[in-house]
Amino acid sequence: MKAVMVDQRFFKDYSMEQELCAKHGIELVLTDVKDEADYIEKCRDADAILIVYSPTPKSVIDKLEKCKVMVRYGVGYDVIDVEAATAKGIAVCNIPDYCAEEVAAHTAALALDCLRKITYLNSTVHNGEWVAGAGYPIRRLSSMTYGICGFGNIARTAAKFMKNFGFNIIAYDPYVGEEAFEKLGVKKVELDELCRESDLISVHVPLNKSTFHLIAKEQFAMMKKGVIIINTARGGLVCQEDLLDAIDAGIVKAAGLDVLETEPITDPNERILKYDNVIITPHSAAQGVEAIGDLRRKVVEVAAAVLEGELPFNVVNKRDLLK
């Protein structure tokens, strides 16, 4: 059996994956695909494809002759045309449980940074100022409502972390039952109510056609003046231009973003870089020694399981494949 890693540049060393593949009788081929034609040529006879960033559209999937499984190194899988893969009988897998603690911690860190103006005040000191009350007013955390958009593993871990600071917590997720909310003492609400009631909102949903720009002009118009927005999921969930317009309008007072609609930023004159109340980190929320180790091991284990005839829990199109 043959597995092809199409984003070799992501890690410097693949000895872990190679050793694990060998134990399952899988040959691991490492490459970087340049375009669709190159992708097809290198993966035409692959039994498994391991993906980080490379777009994998229907035009590529339709030309694959042996592929049984595609595994995304990460939680999101929006780079893969799942519908096209399903039509070909290909299992699409993500790794949803490798970095919940790390991303939740990053979410909390960005939130607290915005709430307490850490980065902003640090910059004022470095610029020669010593004004404790510079910038927007700081509020007591226990007086605030934290709204969570999505209530999966990462969101629930973030709720546990933030609950210790005294926030009133509400969350929106139409796909999660009441029991999960009640277990953590979180009130389940609709998206409109979350937008109206929250002082701080963090976003934790997958990016797909139905969630693209889930938070945009209409939602910002419902929000309290002075709301803080945190996004550690996918840039396309929050309309970036509408977010900046909402900051200009005084609706949003600060934002902490680990993800942007276009990554990386290459233009130093990009509009979003002009805001000193927007904290940006380079899609780094999942980073951590333990998390990355778990990710690399699980990618191979999941690919091998499918090739050996199983459909593990993280086959995202499992239901459709079983029809």
Image (spheres, rainbow, N blue to C red):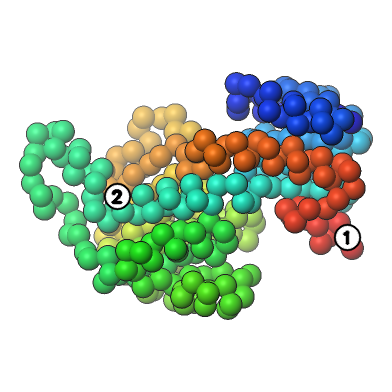
Q: Name the element at disc 1.
A: loop
Disc 1 marks a residue whose amino acid type is Leu
Above/below status of 10 relative to 195: above
> Which residue bears the numbered disc 2?
113
Quarter the C terminus occupies = bottom right
Does residue 186 appear in this view?
A: yes
Q: Name the element at disc 2.
A: helix
10 Å crowding of disc 2: few (<14), some (14-19), many (20+): some
Q: Residue at x 35, y 64 (%)?
A: 164
> Which residue bears the numbered disc 1?
322
Front residue of 55 and 8: 8
Number of numbered discs present? 2
Front residue of 13 and 268: 13
Q: Quadrant of residue 307?
A: top right
Q: Position of residue 126 (x, y in %)?
A: 16, 33
Above/below status of 232 relative to 190: above
